[in-house]
Image (cartoon, helix red, strand yellow):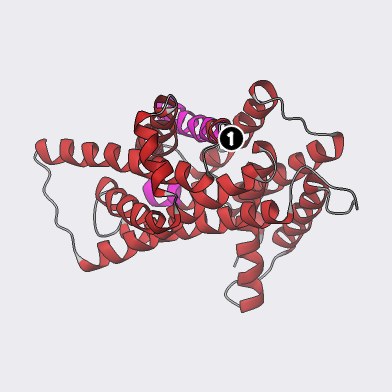
Amino acid sequence: MNSTALDVLSQNLSGEIVLFPSTLLVISAAFQWGLAGGLASLLMSRGWSPEVISFWRVLVGLGCMAIWLAVIRIQGQRFSFNRRLVFWSLVAGLGVAGNFTFYFISISEGSVAVAVTLMYSAPVFVYLVSFIAGVERPTPVKLVTIALVMGGIVLLTGIYRTEADAITTLGIVSGLLAGVSYALFIFGFKYAGKYGPAPSVLVIAFVTGTLVLLPLIDRGQAMTVTISADVAWFILLGLLGAGLSFYCYIVGLRHTLPTTASIVAMVEPVTAALFGLLLLSEALNLSQMAGMALILGAVTSLSILQSRPSLSGAP
């Protein structure tokens, strides 16, 4: 989950006091998302398709959110599903399906480190579209950040070289679309949260994601997951990528400030990159490492400055 996304949700959910245990929960969530990318790459190396892996990630996440929602109801909290809650949750669900699937496709076309960094950088392009559409006014800080991220992408993907590289054009596009899809999820989640609690929003979102992915998967392969030797890995991926991680994330952000959340979001791409390096024998050359550092540093800095309008030059 990228730092821009954390900013949005932090502003929506955080309190005024930063509690260290809450920050640890956010770090734990980012760490789990990083591991999820590595586990997905491991499963793809065993022959499972990105779409099937995405489907099971959403499905296991749905089960976890349903349990959370049931516990809340047993504790006596009552709430109803209204049209606005359902609508915005559906939007969030489309973002979930797109984010998971495009991210895993990007991994399959390149590496975990490159895919997660591209996903992390994509929200910057949302700023660029906003500038072009006149929705938001460009500032020097934002323009410099966009330039740095674009330069980082060039170094990370090696698109300036003529020989074959570690990631294909499909991988690059999918990585960026994963970030755009995540921005869509954040947008839907933010507005849905005004009309109902987070567990109910996530239940509807994950149901939507499951239904969206169902026509896109190889159903025969998806069914064999339950009897395969890899079923435990699928369950672990779902728990880390869409179950326990979302619980830690939502609860932790209630008492974590946006600037803190922006910094600890770096745990996700770093964890994913280390997983690929140490367990999957993936490697980054010097130019790719420089590109990764540029992107992560620029996006994180922008997120921190965005929470301080006087420094960022925001209107």
Residue 282 lies in what quarter of the image? top right
Q: Which residue is nearer to you in this view: 97 or 29? A: 97
Magenta span dominant secondary structure: helix
Looking at the rendered structure, the kind of residue marked 1 is: Ser
In the image, residue 70 sits, relative to residue 202, either above or below, namely: above
Whether residue 178 appears in this view of the structure is yes
In the image, residue 144 sits, relative to residue 152, either above or below, namely: below
In the image, residue 48 sits, relative to residue 106, either above or below, namely: above
Q: Which residue is nearer to you in this view: 96 or 270? A: 96
Side of 223 relative to 145 (left or right): left
Give yes or no for residue 123 being in the magenta stretch. Answer: no
Residue at the spot x=46%, y=33% of the render? 29
Residue 200 percent location from the top left of the image: 24, 50
Residue at the spot x=40%, y=25% of the render? 232
Side of 221 relative to 108 (left or right): left
Q: Which residues are magenta?
A: 9-38
Per the image, label 1 sits on a secondary structure element best described as: helix
Residue 104 percent location from the top left of the image: 56, 45
Side of 220 relative to 293 (left or right): left
Give yes or no for residue 36 being in the magenta stretch. Answer: yes
Residue at the spot x=26%, y=67% of the render? 84
Q: Residue furthest bottom?
A: 134
Q: Which residue is mark 1?
A: 41
Residue 60 percent location from the top left of the image: 34, 38
Residue at the spot x=90%, y=51% of the render? 161
Q: Which residue is nearer to you in this view: 53 or 209? A: 53
